[in-house]
Amino acid sequence: MDFSFARAFKQRRKCWHYQWVATLIERLAQVAYEAYRAALPTPALLWEDLTKQERQAWKAAVTAVAGQTGGTLTDAPSGRSLVIQLGEQRHTFRADFTVGREGRLTIDDDFASGQHARFLTVRGLWYVEDLDSTNGTTLNGRPILSVQLLKKRDKIRIGQTVMTVVSV
């Protein structure tokens, strides 16, 4: 088997699983919104009529609620923690979370969006994705255009804030 083909197949398999998880999170967010909408005394917009940012906020809320319960649908039973160095502080996460001015990991940065980036775990591996932020997110100096696998010593820049992966 051609080595480059094997590598591409392995990457595609990882992406397939991530796409499945992203679809599941999207569906959970939609169900949560529909339940919220049904409980309102006055009519609200349909899920399809929400802005992209509003839908992303609902997806972030679904993963944040799952994080408060100690796990997510994407956690493996023996999932590993993610430790991030931000300034002088280290933060440890065991479940998906968002980073931004209003994220679970809050950063005080005028160049960061409210929900700027999402960190998620799939089968014990940690990934990062930009949530269509205004100023983008970089991983080791390169713009994040799609979900990226994290490894020790990776540097993630959100706005003007740089954080380092201590362990995964």
Image (cartoon, helix red, strand yellow):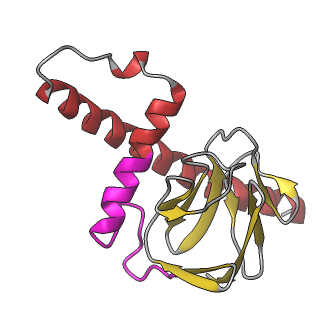
Q: From what the image shows, is residue 104 above or below residue 123? A: above
Quadrant of the rendered structure where residue 86 is?
bottom right
User: Measuring 31% from the left and 67% from the top, which residue is drawn there?
Assistant: 68
Question: How many numbered circles are shown?
Answer: 0
Residue 66 is situated, as x and y percent measured from the top left of the image, at: 32, 61
Q: Who's the residue at 76% across and 43% down the image?
A: 135
Q: Quadrant of residue 28?
A: top left
**Is 5 in front, or is 147?**
147
Viewer-proximal residue, 7 or 38? 38
Which span of residues is magenta-colored?
60-81
Expressed as whole percent of the image width and height from the top left, the position of residue 19 reads 55, 46
Judge by depth and name the residue closer to the eye, 4 or 148.
148
Left or right of 104, for residue 7? right
Is residue 89 positioned above or below 121 on the image?
below
Magenta segment includes 92? no
Question: Is 102 or 34 nearer to us in this picture?
Answer: 102
Tell me the quarter of the image containing the C terminus.
bottom right
Q: Quadrant of the N terminus?
A: bottom right
Q: Is residue 152 left or right of residue 52?
A: right
- x and y percentages locating residue 90 in the rendered image: 59, 84
